[in-house]
Amino acid sequence: MASLNYNHLRYFWVVAQEGAMTRAARRLNVSQSALSVQLQKLEQQLGVALFDRAGRRLVLTEAGQIALDYANTVFETGEELFDTLKGRSAATHKRLRVGALTTLSRNFQLGFLRPLLARPDVELTVSSGGTRELFARLEERSLDLVLANSPAPLDARSSLRSHLIDAQTVSLVARPGAASSAFDYPAALDGASLVLPGPESEIRRAFDRAMDLAGVTPDVHAEVDDMAMLRLFAREHDGLTLVPPIVVRDELARGDLVEVCQVPGITESFYAIIQNRRFPNPLLSILLAGP
């Protein structure tokens, strides 16, 4: 078997960084035609296409993204060689790029990613955003995984796959003494001051339907999309807050908040959404394997 030509790999690495043959050829000080020939040789040796064309831009294929990850490791290792010989040894890292819905519980994110947190060979990058933005980044392979509380839309053309990780109860919580010990759900909510998740939340939609069916009209004191902010409101509000207990886990443990009642029939689901790839990030199997 022929060995890898690292000069070809460096050419590929620069083209992937620049996103265009012209800029890469200028940076490498070679002709564009010579650069194109070297890339073709690398693709022939690997047996896969590394780029697709999008207008004048070159876009990495799935195999190209995998090759880029390895190329980054190869050339970073070269830098580590110099560091090691100078007495500054550095460990090689595996990388997982995670996107999380802005409103998703931080406690859930931490619990889900915990199997990788103690590993010195793993580099985690976690970024937040909206659903559309995160799914677009997953499709273009700049993320390996998206955490959300609803599955990816079912679309025959989409390569996204949703894994249900957990489903947890939703409760009404309050500061100690703010609610009667003999709480009568749902009648006690008629006119009660509530802090609720925002109207686009699946939890909120289910709660509103339950209130409509019961003929109950709460007094909505505040609507909060972000779960971290909802947690702060629950600590300050004199009334009730609708929230998954995982969000206020620490406050419940300390006694700063108490669970007034679990809301029947309402749960929050947590999904790990990945792209169906031929070459998935191997770290995903650790997270998706569950406890």
Image (cartoon, rainbow, N blue to C red):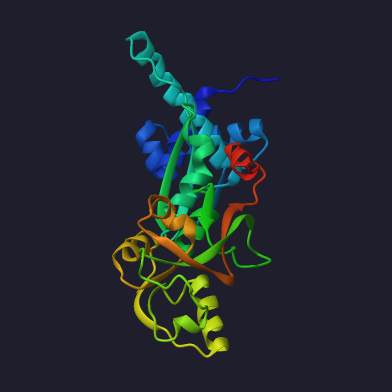
Give the percent coordinates (x, y) of residue 13.
46, 34
User: Residue pushed farthest right?
Assistant: 1
User: Residue pushed farthest front?
Assistant: 182
Residue appearing at x 65%, y 67% in the figure: 154
The answer to which of 194 and 13 lies nearer the viewer is: 194
Give the percent coordinates (x, y) of residue 258.
42, 61
The answer to whether residue 138 is left or right of residue 102 is right
Give the percent coordinates (x, y) of residue 183.
48, 75
**Do we see residue 128 in this rendering?**
yes
Give the percent coordinates (x, y) of residue 98.
48, 47
Image quarter in which the C terminus is found: top right
The answer to which of 158 and 114 lies nearer the viewer is: 114
**Do we see residue 68 in this rendering?**
no
Q: Name the quadrant containing residue 286.
A: top right
User: Residue pushed farthest left?
Assistant: 236
Q: Name the quadrant containing residue 37.
A: top right
Q: Name the quadrant containing residue 264.
A: bottom right
Residue appearing at x 55%, y 76% in the figure: 206
The answer to which of 274 and 15 lies nearer the viewer is: 274
Q: Looking at the image, is 155 positioned above or below residue 20?
A: below
Q: Looking at the image, is 1 positioned above or below residue 39?
A: above
The answer to whether residue 117 is left or right of residue 61 is left
The answer to which of 215 and 15 lies nearer the viewer is: 215
Image quarter in which the N terminus is found: top right
